[in-house]
Amino acid sequence: MSSVILQGATRLLVALILLFSVYMLMRGHNLPGGGFIAGLIASAAFVLYALAWSLQEARAALRVSPVKLAAIGALLSLASAVPGLLKGFPPFTGLWLFIGGGEGDKGIPISTVLLFDVGIYLAVLGAVLALFFTIEVD
Amino acid sequence: MGWLLALPFLLPIATGLFALGARRKPRRARTISLLGCVGLFVIVVIIFVRVIDEGTIAAQMGNWPAPFGITLVADRLSAIMLLLAGLVGLAVAIFAQADVDLRREVLGFQGFYQLLLAGVCGSFVTGDLFNLYVWFEVMLIASFALLILGGERAQLDGGIKYVALNLVSTLFMLMAIGMVYGLTGTLNLAALHTALAQVEQPAALHMLAVLLIVAFGIKAALFPLYFWLPASYHVPPVAVTAVFAGLLTKVGVYALIRTFTLIFPADFSFAHDLLLIAALLTMLSGVIGAASQYEFRKILAFHIISQIGFLVLGLALFSPLALAGSIFYMVHNIVAKTNLLLISGTARRMTGSFNLAEIGGLYRVSPVLAAVFFIAAFSLAGFPPLSGFWAKLMLVSASLEQAAYWVAAIALITGALTLFSMSKIWSEAFWKPHPTGEARSLTSLTVTERIQRMLPALLLVAITLGLGLFPQPLIQFCETAAKELLDPAGYVATVLPSRGG
């Protein structure tokens, strides 16, 4: 399918959708959202890109193979359990690291929960795109 | 403690990821997968020993107290199911080294196999209804991939039927979960034990029971929801059928036992009557279906259904002896059934087909294989002194205890018909001469392949024999497990210490 309108709109939309997926990922910490749904949204961006341009271009835009992305994501999620192990807590206990804290300011909180969510995000993105790319070839 | 209970699913997931990463180097992927299965077996043995020593153990994931976080619980039922999952996982992983072809391994067989084990173990260890659903999904994805891996026409046909019907089951389960949450505000199984007893809406409870029976009944292949099983179990490689037969349907039965002993009130006779009728019809229709088949693996597939009936029968009768019988039957059945399917794979390797009309002469060329089949098959039919005899004895005496004579009669008829099918396989595949030429003997295989094919079969048959000759320790264990199930106060107190049970 090559439609100038779709292709023009896609350029804008893909960037917006990807940005929105990151927003959902971050928002999911305390509100509805999170890695799973954000990963689905991000994969929708790549699916749209593939429909507007071509499968090859979408693959090229992703840069890494989707299966590899899924595996890396799953490993990241598993890795988020490790800090808890080292500190002697049950698996997947949320642990925080505060970067650049000052007086009255805790700094930027980086948590194992975020790591887990980012892992899920990549795993879902990779898995959905792996399926989509396979089906589209046929 | 938390790590010990999380490892049965964390380890297979990690193993699976590494095996998937190494799938283009099949030898390495195989080694990773095999090591993972050995590790899993060690872990489940440790859990089993701890549960026997200390009783029910629980862990709160992420340090969130129950009922807010996800709880992992292992009581005696979970522990024995985990042990069986580890055992079958290891046995089939060894067998798969000889049985699964290189093409499927490159496509990621080992990775999906490990993911399936993760789903099975996760289901056995979780103490949360929604988490159970998640593990069911993990199992569904992994089993679908294993079914269609290789992409043969028959595989896709069977795979579509399998996944379509299982999605229906998933849908029912989700609806039930939504209802439970709406009624009680919790999904923690231990918290539901008290919460659901306070719900004063019999109509809602009945509806919930039916939804869960349908959802888990499809997974367990219960009458009349089993038709996906014969449509799909004969298409993938034998190793896949073996692990499906050994574990997948049993997870459905486990979920039924868990929910109907723990979360529903014990005097819920509506559900027990429903389960009893379904169980009896499952036993009969499965065994009659098997009698009409003329293919090694299809006969065994229909027998899976018939055996599911026995497992559910113990739950439906709902007495200590009946539940203990159910658990004993589960152990016996998983070991014997997996073994029979492994043997059917080796028999095909020797003779070239699953079709009983085209094969034969196995007894003459490999008496060892014949002996292993004989023991496993007659154990399945319930011959003394093999493990199936004690399992059936417990269930039949439990039904006589309740004066349910016709239940006992149906169980015995099913046993007789099972014997008919098993003798058919015996006389056709093993006894009669090969119709065209000669069956290969085991010695014609390479030493490695012989070990990979026969070691798991011999291991499993040794367990069948051991359980048959010395059933007492397991019977005692099952009776304690049944007592725990019928009086969940200990389970609830372990998960929710603040409520004091």
Image: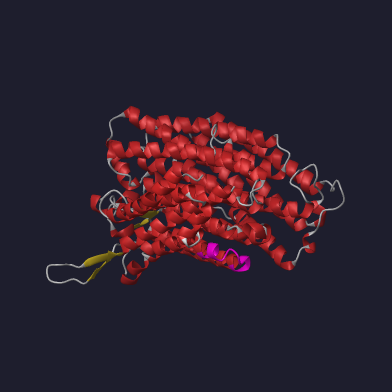
**Residue drawn at the location 33% of the way across and 69% of the way down:** A83
The answer to if B313 sits in the magenta stretch is no
Q: Position of residue B279 (x, y in %)?
A: 53, 34
Q: Position of residue B382 (x, y in %)?
A: 63, 44
* Res. A7 in view: yes
Say which of B306 and B395 sits in front: B306
Q: Is residue B145 above or below residue B169?
A: below
Instruction: Check the image and report above or below for A108 versus B355.
Output: below
Q: Residue furthest right?
A: B437
Residue at 85 percent across and 46 percent down: it is: B435
Chief SS of the magenta region: helix
Residue at image position (55%, 51%) is A134
Residue B442 pos. (x, y %)? 77, 60
Horizontal side of A74 relative to B203 (left or right) equals right
Q: Quadrant of residue B182?
A: top left
Asked if residue B234 can be seen in this view, the reply is: no
Please report the bounds of the magenta region as a residue range: B18-28
Residue at position x 46%, y 49% from top?
A47
Give the farthest residue toward the left. Answer: A104
